[in-house]
Image (tube, rainbow, N blue to C red):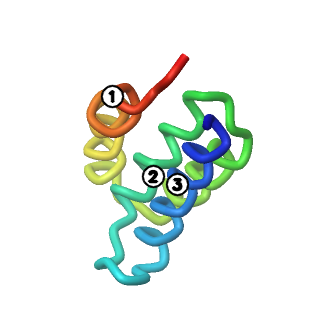
C-alpha cells in the first residue's frame, strides 16, 4: 500500500509541475514533493529542490505550509498499518 501512496504523490507532483490536466502550480508540486520527502523519498527531495529554484521566496513560504495539510487530509485517513 505504501508503494501506491508514493506513486500517487509523485503523480500529483508531476501533474502540478508540468501543468498536465491541471493548471501549472509550482507551489503544489513542491508541497507534494515535500510529502514524498517526509517519508524518506530521495526523488521527492531532489525534485523539491529543483522546483524551489523556479519559485519566488513568497511561493516557497506558501509551499512550506501545505505538506502538513496534505499529509493530514490525504494520507493519514487512508493509512492502514
Residue 36 x, y percent position in the rendering = 56, 40
Q: Answer left or right for 54 relative to 60.
A: right
Residue at image position (48%, 78%) is 18
Residue at image position (59%, 49%) is 49
* Residue 35 versus residue 7 in the image, above or below: above
Q: Answer left or right for 28 relative to 45.
A: left
Quarter-of-image position of residue 75: top left
Residue 48 x, y percent position in the rendering = 56, 50
Q: Which residue is mark 2?
A: 30
Real-space Cα distance between discs 3 and 2? 14 Å
| Viewer-proximal residue among 31 and 70 | 70
> Which circle's residue, 1 or 2, is located before the other in the chain?
2
Quarter of the N terminus within the rendering: top right
Q: Which residue is mark 3?
A: 8
User: Given contact means CB atoms under 8 Å apart, are the residues at marks 3 and 2 in contact?
Assistant: no
Nearest to viewer (mark 1 / mark 3): 1
Residue at image position (49%, 60%) is 13
Real-space Cα distance between discs 1 and 2? 22 Å
**Circle 3: element type:** helix
Q: Which residue is mark 1?
A: 77
Q: Residues within 10 Å of mark 1 (few under 14, many from 20)?
A: few
**Circle 2: element type:** helix
Quarter-of-image position of residue 6: top right
Amino acid at each position: 500500500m505504501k508503494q501506491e501512496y508514493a506513486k500517487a504523490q509523485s503523480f500529483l507532483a508531476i501533474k502540478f509541475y508540468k501543468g498536465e490536466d491541471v493548471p501549472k502550480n509550482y507551489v503544489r508540486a513542491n508541497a507534494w514533493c515535500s510529502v514524498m520527502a517526509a517519508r524518506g523519498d530521495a526523488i521527492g527531495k531532489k525534485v523539491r529542490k529543483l522546483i524551489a529554484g523556479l519559485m519566488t521566496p513568497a511561493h516557497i513560504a506558501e509551499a512550506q505550509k501545505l505538506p502538513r495539510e496534505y499529509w493530514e487530509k490525504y494520507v493519514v485517513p487512508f493509512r492502514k498499518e
